[in-house]
Image (tube, rainbow, N blue to C red):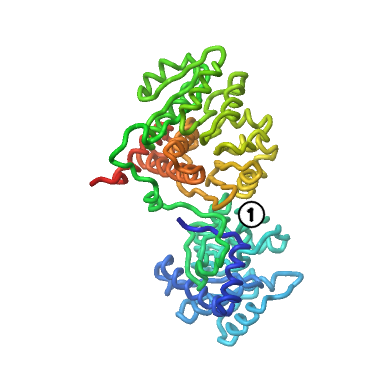
Amino acid sequence: MRYLVTGKEMKLLDQNTSNCFHVPELVLMEQAAMHFVWKLCDVLSDIENKKGIVFCGLGNNGADGIAIARLLNERGIVTHVCTIRDFLSQKGDVSESFSVQEAIYQAYHYPVVHNMQQVLCSEYDFVIDAVFGIGLSRALNKEYIEIIEHINAIKGVKIAVDMPSGINSDNGQIMGAAVACDYTITFSFEKVGQYLWPGWDYAGKTCVVDMGITEKSWMDKKPSMAYLEKHDLNSLPKRPDHSNKGTFGKLLIIAGSKNMAGAAIFAAKAAYRCGVGLVKIVTCETNREIIQTSIPEALLSTYTNKVEKDVLVEDVKWADAIVIGPGIGCGKIAKEMVELVRSTASVPVVLDADALNVIAEDVNKLILPHTEFVVTPHLGEFSRLTNQSISWIQNHLAESATDFARTYDVICVLKDFHTVTANPYGLSFLNLTGNNGMATGGSGDVLSGIIGAFLAQGMMGQQAASYGVYIHGLAGDIAREQAGCHGMLASDIIEALKDIWKGFDNVK
């Protein structure tokens, strides 16, 4: 697991390092510049024979850029400095660190460029963006946008110092314009905005380097977001040898409406592929034959023109976890089933797809203290739940998911390019697995089955949801290798789950 920090969190870490551990700001800056140069020499082959330029803002990020340019020139790598001060009608103040680094650079008489036309007419092998760092939170004015457009027009490999200029480090949004980078070399910890869309597109490949700020600088306040890595799967519960199907939980899946059996099949198969002991499907009677043919391992309970509430209550009591919503529609029967589960379930419940559309009619019904809810909306469903526009949600993905989780005391899995799993009381997760081939019918049903399987096996909601999203994406990445993005089906994702578990089980 690796932590991601926001701009405010990183600034606090910086302050803690200087105030509590007595490391001066200029020492941190020199270490950051040195490690940046080392990493730059790794990513750019034959850099000794290349020529570069560093665009520097007037704050600490610009000071980092000047220090980097100085160290590159010391190595014999011809590097020019171009400060944006020369292109602003209102010059503004410079940071103390900028003044110090500029004075050092000038004392060595290293090259400076003052004319943008000269820059645009020159040839550079690499361009370092040190205009803005992690502190940018307001829209850029016309002059800054023009500067960024000029930087983007220069040929050569582009590398950002800590954060691509113009990208909000907290939510990944473009603040008017942004430098499109091939690499981002960031300090100490990756930033949330580097992995949210569209910041992901502008950051290029993100590399983390040390600058002397460690986890000790967290003091008693850890970052609020992280992402999982493959070795984290080792923390999943192992299957005991002395066991039976009851050991691994019973999952009730309420899914599928008339002639809509696919959602139930996908969710059930995915659940079985993730180790649950028993699955019972509740669905429309018209789906009986295809479900029993497609997944004979599953138990089956059906309804016709109405739901037998007493039967459904018994099914709910039978389960160790429940998934409800995929393909059930939004009609009277669906509403009755959602309400019954919502009001009577005492085990963890995954609310997905149509169940969320039903709940959206009165979202306050989510506030129930007697059981744990995991909601798994895509952007459209979340828009209906919150009455916010899809564009606004996408621009505030992590914030939206966290606010919803805290407001309704649920685990919120907000599905997007990089899905956010928000925990109302603790660490939230940004998922980095998966690919665009998973944008296919049934993929979400697979995810709900995976999360339900983990809940039925006794995992807490936050762990079941975050690991479920990670494993779902990992299976999608395996399926991409086998079927390609264009040809991927939801069933390919299910089949790929087998490859994840190979070698994972404890074998004596």
Residues packed near mark 1 inside 10 Å, few (<14), some (14 to 19) or many (20 plus): many
Q: Nearer the viewer, residue 40 or 332?
A: 332
Instruction: Judge whether residue 435 can be spotted in this image.
Output: no
- Left or right relative to 121: residue 274: left
- Left or right relative to 231: residue 168: right
Looking at the picture, which amino acid does disc 1 mark? Ile
Q: Nearer the viewer, residue 252 or 326?
A: 252
- The x, y position of residue 445, in whole percent, is 48, 32
Q: Which element carries disc 1, helix, strand or loop?
A: loop
What residue is rendered at 71% in x and 63% in y?
Answer: 143
Instruction: Judge whether residue 185 can be spotted in this image.
Output: yes
Q: Residue furthest right?
A: 90
Q: Residue furthest top?
A: 305
Which residue in the structure is indicated by mark 1? 174
Q: Nearer the viewer, residue 273 or 491?
A: 273
| 352 lies above or below 431 | above
What residue is rendered at 56% in x and 37% in y?
Answer: 371
